[in-house]
Image: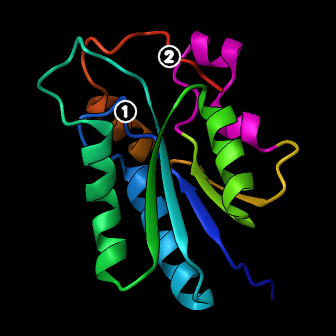
Amino acid sequence: MMTYTRICVAVALQRYVDLTPIALRQREVALALARAWGAPLTVISVDAPVSLLPDVETTAEKLERFAQPLVAADLQVTTVVARGRPSQEIRCHVVEVGADLLIIGSHSKRGPLDVGLGSTAAALEHDLPATVLMLRPQDEEAAQARELMIPRYPIVFPYG
């Protein structure tokens, strides 16, 4: 059985009012694997500066809330909010921290824009010096994620 020594979890938070079902599943998987291998965790989310939505919890606040159960489980956890193109920022961070496992969630294709531009998860599967564990949503999880999308969130965000 393969053992990983440093785990990175890339979680999408900026477009959603609350943590999505796939993000919660990512956290469960990261918790189980980090415990099993005694590996430290780095949790990263890429933020987009959106001043149009002043009453929405920030990505940094959501990230801390996401990481709290991991910290409470006595795991070594570092959180990072990056800015820029998600696939580039996540790739750079995986390399920088020397992660050998990346846990990422796919929110599946939501429409023609996603199909045309691709997704962060798909962009990260190629040429990354770490194993990529991609969690895909079940139909009901994808529907719940759509319901959690922030109204008026900019349609075009730097995908991939």
Give me the residue at 34% from left, 84% from top: 73
SS for dot 2? loop
Task: Determine which residue is flagged by label 2.
Answer: 157
Q: Quadrant of residue 108?
A: top right
Asked whether 148 or 83 is in front, the reply is 83
Q: Which residues are magenta?
A: 107-125
Indicate the quadrant containing the C terminus: top left, top right, bottom left or bottom right: top right
Up-down relation of residue 40 to residue 48 (above or below): below
Q: Quadrant of residue 92?
A: top right
Residue positioned 44% across, 70% down in the render: 77
User: At label 2, which amino acid type do we have?
Assistant: Phe
- The quadrant in which residue 14 appears is top left
- Residue 102: x percent and y percent? 66, 59
Q: Which residue is mark 1?
A: 14
Seen at 60% across and 22% down, the residue is 159
Q: Is residue 107 above or below residue 25?
A: above
Q: Position of residue 157 (x, y in %)?
A: 50, 16
Image disc number at residue 152: none
Q: Is residue 108 left or right of residue 115?
A: left
Please tell me which of labels 1 and 2 falls first in the chain: 1
Distance, label 1 to label 2, CA atoms, is: 10 Å
Above or below 120: residue 7: below
Q: Nearer the viewer, residue 62 or 119?
A: 62
Give the side of residue 149 with respect to residue 101, left or right: left
- Is 111 in front, or is 140? 111
In the rendering, at what x and y percent does residue 152 appear? 27, 11
Tell me if residue 114 is in the magenta stretch.
yes
Query: x, y (%) of residue 76?
Result: 46, 78
**Left or right, 134 with reference to 72:** right
- Within the magenta stretch, is there residue 90? no
